[in-house]
Amino acid sequence: MTKISLPALPLNEWQDTLSTLHMWSQIVGKIANARSPLVNQFWNCSLRVTPRGLTTLPLNCGTTTLTFEFDFVAHELVIRCESGQTRSVKLEPRTVADFYAAVMQALSELKADVKIWTMPVEVEDPIRFTEDTKHASYDAEYVERLQTILIWTNNVFEEFRARFVGKNSPVQFFWGSFDMAVTRFNGEKAPPRKDADYITREAYSQACISHGFWCGSGAVQEPAFYAYAAPEPDGLKQAKILPDAGYYHQTMGEFILPYEAVRTSDDPEKAVLDFMQSTYDAAADLANWKRSDLERASAFSAPDAK
């Protein structure tokens, strides 16, 4: 992987932009969810990293098929249709309500009207998109920093993903929680989660070990890489992991590796891969996964030279 200088991403300096961008992504994500059939743990409506930002998969909107791409280079949301028509919505300081109206107007012009539930999900004190004039920030510099991090992280996660031959999610960006993740499954059903909402029941319907990156919120007020197993096997909290900067967060129930520790390390790629591999090793062994059937042997030992 090409060595790059990873940018700082202090949460306190771009929190307002992050909150606004999160709501904008939910608008697009809800459209994707409404216009695509459910696939494994909502993989159908997640966003994917591109060289310029984040995109949906192609969406069937009745009379046309289209995609949405957050272009963090030109700073616009671009809607592309199979007919060759395009529409764009500027990414700039503007309210969520204004952004929502602009997106819906663009869809109407393309004869691709879509109805969505306008209440955000997975956030505290949600405000309907149509009424949200609170979130209206957009700092292009920090969005560009985020894009640099997302591209780099996507490449590292793809490297890790390639080591697994079992059911394995794409590297994808979830607009609900605003984080990037890649998840491994062992093929077994997970115990039903009582009283869980529909999203959670589907997301954790099968035993998995997941790794990801988020920008920071809630119990972890900084950008960080994370790892967890669902269901969590006994003894995982006490597992020894790499690198030394990683730790188990008791409240979150996840292993955490601060982004700043990665960014300032001698080898950021190695730090993240060590974190992902060591947490996976611990969880998979404690949960008695049939690892020989699920992993590429070449990922762990090179063949003898002849």
Image: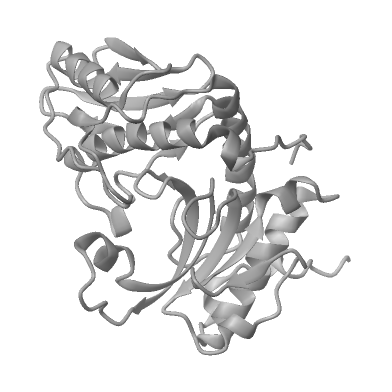
State left or right for residue 7 relative to residue 98: right
Q: Nearer the viewer, residue 280 or 30?
A: 30
Examine the rendered structure and indicate whether residue 210 appears above or below residue 114.
below
Task: Tell me which colouring the rendered structure shows.
Answer: one colour
* Residue at (14, 40) in percent of width and height: 117
Q: Quadrant of the C terminus?
A: bottom right
**Residue at the image point whose x is 20% and y is 74% from the top:** 195
Query: Would you say residue 292 is visible in this rendering?
Result: no
Q: Please state if 204 lies on the left or on the right of 155 as rendered.
A: left
Residue 289: where, in percent of width, then height? 51, 82
- Residue closer to the observer: 33 or 176: 176
Q: In this picture, is 57 found above or below 80?
A: below
Q: Nearer the viewer, residue 73 or 291?
A: 73
Which quadrant: the N terminus? Answer: top right
* Side of 277 where 140 appears, left or right: left
The residue depicted at 53 percent of the width and 73 percent of the height is: 294
Q: Is residue 189 visible?
A: yes
Q: From what the image shows, is residue 126 above or below residue 280?
A: above
Q: How many labels sit on residues?
A: 0
Percent across and percent down for residue 139 are 53, 23
Name the image quarter holding residue 227.
Answer: bottom right
Relative to residue 120, is residue 283 drawn left or right?
right
Q: Position of residue 233 (x, y in %)?
A: 49, 85
The residue positioned farthest toward the right in the image shown? 306
Residue 68, x across and y down, in percent:
33, 26
Q: Residue at x 72, y 37 (%)?
A: 6
